[in-house]
Image: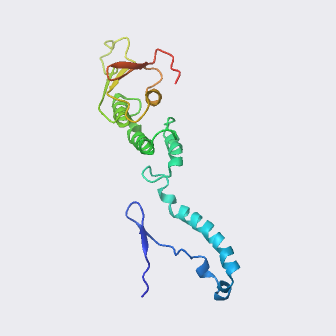
Amino acid sequence: MERISATVVPGGQTRPQRSPTWMLDQLPVSMLDHDFFVRFVSIFQHLGTTLLEDADNIEHVASTTVAPSPLLPYLASWIGVETIDDSQPESLQRRIVAGAAKTLTWRGTARGLRSYLELISEGPADVEEGGGIWRAGDAPQDTAWVVMRVRSTGLLELTDFIDVVRDEVPAHVRAELYVGPDRVWTSDEEWPG
């Protein structure tokens, strides 16, 4: 009985391993005697192998753990994250896309903002906001504000960090962002970022 080797893919599944000479192995024996023909078919075998490997991987392309890095900004755009770019470390891009997807249902809330800040700053985040529930007539005049505090910007440069945070704060909300003791951004000021 012939043994077929297999490759383990993400998720613990396996797929049969392809012979490195899979296309040449399909040729009639008489054609394998001609060196030029073997070399010529080998070109197509190499190209075909690349295409088959891509096809074998298609089910994993949308996973942030194994997706090709050039695809990460595209995946991020599906969930409204427009601040992923090649200048950021790949591990950070993957974390941001995965984290943004997990917090998507909480986007625009203090909980969602806190989770996202903790994700990108790689530390604790404090979010104070003016929202709440009041009896009719008891609501304060100004409830659309948020103050965010983090210890650091994680792996991001300050301007990139501010750009990411600006994308997460609802447009109608006045916001202030502190990194350590310093106020680094307020929505009342123009941001050149």
Residue closest to the far front? 35
Q: Is residue 141 visible?
A: yes
In the image, residue 155 lies at what x, y percent? 40, 36
Q: Nearer the viewer, residue 154 or 36?
A: 36
Q: Quadrant of residue 55?
A: bottom right
Q: Is residue 145 visible?
A: no
Image quarter where the N terminus lies is: bottom left
In this rendering, is residue 84 above or below 66? above
In the image, residue 137 lies at what x, y percent? 33, 12
What's the residue at 46%, 14% (across, down)? 188
In this rendering, is residue 122 above or below 169? below
Q: Nearer the viewer, residue 150 or 61?
A: 150
Q: Is residue 95 left or right of residue 45?
A: left
In the image, residue 86 lies at what x, y percent? 52, 41
Q: Quadrant of residue 107?
A: top left
Q: Nearer the viewer, residue 53 or 130?
A: 53
Q: Nearer the viewer, residue 53 or 38?
A: 38
Q: Is residue 77 left or right of residue 186?
A: right
In the image, residue 149 lies at what x, y percent? 33, 24
In this rendering, is residue 66 above or below 153? below
In this rendering, is residue 126 above or below 27? above
Q: Quadrant of residue 128?
A: top left
